[in-house]
Image (tube, coloured by chain):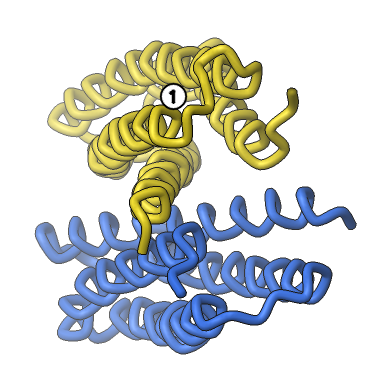
Chain colours: A yellow, B blue
Amino acid sequence: MSTVQWLLGAHVLGAFLFVSGAVAAGALQTAALRRERPSEIAALLSLTRVAVAIVGAGSLLAVGFGAWLVEELQLGWDRTWISAALGLFLASSLFGGLGGRAARHARHLAERLATEGDEPSRELSRALADPIALLLNYGSFLAALAILALMIWKPA
Amino acid sequence: MRSDTLLFLHVLAGMVAVGGLIATGVVALERRRRPGPESGRGGRLAWQLPAGTVAATIVAIALGEGLAGQEDVSAAWLDVSRGLTVFGLVVGGVVLALLARLARTRPRLSGAVAPLAGALVLVGLAVAFVMAAKPA
């Protein structure tokens, strides 16, 4: 296999971990939204941390090997689809980070409520369904999908 | 459907399938770490995730076959990917879903769910690598 084939394989592997980790985090967070008992919600939200770690590892691999590919193939950083993908990656990371802060707050609240009787709480439901946090998380995922689209269509 | 659209949807379905396997693995790990009474939705989630993964894998296969037919591709890397996907992800995914469902009433089986999900994540990533690198 040539260097470019290895780099492309590793880049796509990273992209898979990046998007698949986000899918896993989204699935676990959606499952948490459907629970009422704080202990169950806390357990599911704590699991999203594993998925988020996978997203982080995937983003490092995808960007690192992607940058190496740009140099190896002498594509140039000024191509629209490459610079737009980098911009979208930053946006996805920023939105995901901000949305993740709200989920962290909800997890801490769920953990506290779990030790105080483990009864359903309206405050916890509101924290979980925070519309701004949900919007940021959806925005982060949509940006990741837009990166995938750019990588496939490669518009000039 | 145009090839680029098929490719986009094919890759996306593959990513959803691997994401479902990752979620199945972490849920199964948590259940093994903190075993407790199976309660309604909690138990269902453990096998609904791999069942969804099998569905996403079948969609990825269908789109991939459409793409291969449209581009008239025939190569060793494609055959290897097909083998890994059908015998690894589809058959393995069905076994995983059954195992996770049976583990609701037979706790002894729950220990096998997380390692199998982990192995299937590796198979999924191997398929992604082979399809991207296209070795001769």
Front in this rendered view, residue B118 or B63: B63
User: Which residue in the structure is indicated by mark 1?
Assistant: A128
Tell me the quadrant of the picture where the N terminus of chain B can be found.
bottom right
Q: Residue at x 29, y 80 (%)?
A: B103
Image x and y of residue B94, in percent: 47, 84
- The number of discs equals 1
Q: Is residue B82 left or right of residue A29?
A: right
Q: For the residue carrying disc 1, how many other residues have a C-alpha within 10 Å: few (<14), some (14-19), or many (20+)?
A: many
Q: Residue at x 26, y 75 (%)?
A: B113
Image x and y of residue A23, in percent: 48, 44
- Chain name for mark 1: A
Element at badge 1? Answer: helix
Q: Is residue B131 left or right of residue B117?
A: right
Front in this rendered view, residue A102 or A79: A79
Determine if residue A131 is in view. no
Image x and y of residue B102, in percent: 35, 85
Front in this rendered view, residue B7 or A145: B7
Q: Is residue A109 left or right of residue B46?
A: left
Front in this rendered view, residue B102 or B40: B102
Q: Residue furthest left?
A: B33
Q: Quadrant of residue A48?
A: top left
In the image, what residue type sits under mark 1?
A: Leu
Q: Residue at x 51, y 53 (%)?
A: B15
> Is A56 situated above or below B24?
above
Q: Residue at x 26, y 55 (%)?
A: B26
Image x and y of residue A117, in percent: 19, 33
Determine if residue B136 is in view. yes
Q: Quadrant of residue B121?
A: bottom left
Q: Quadrant of residue A59?
A: top left
> Is B100 situated above or below A136?
below
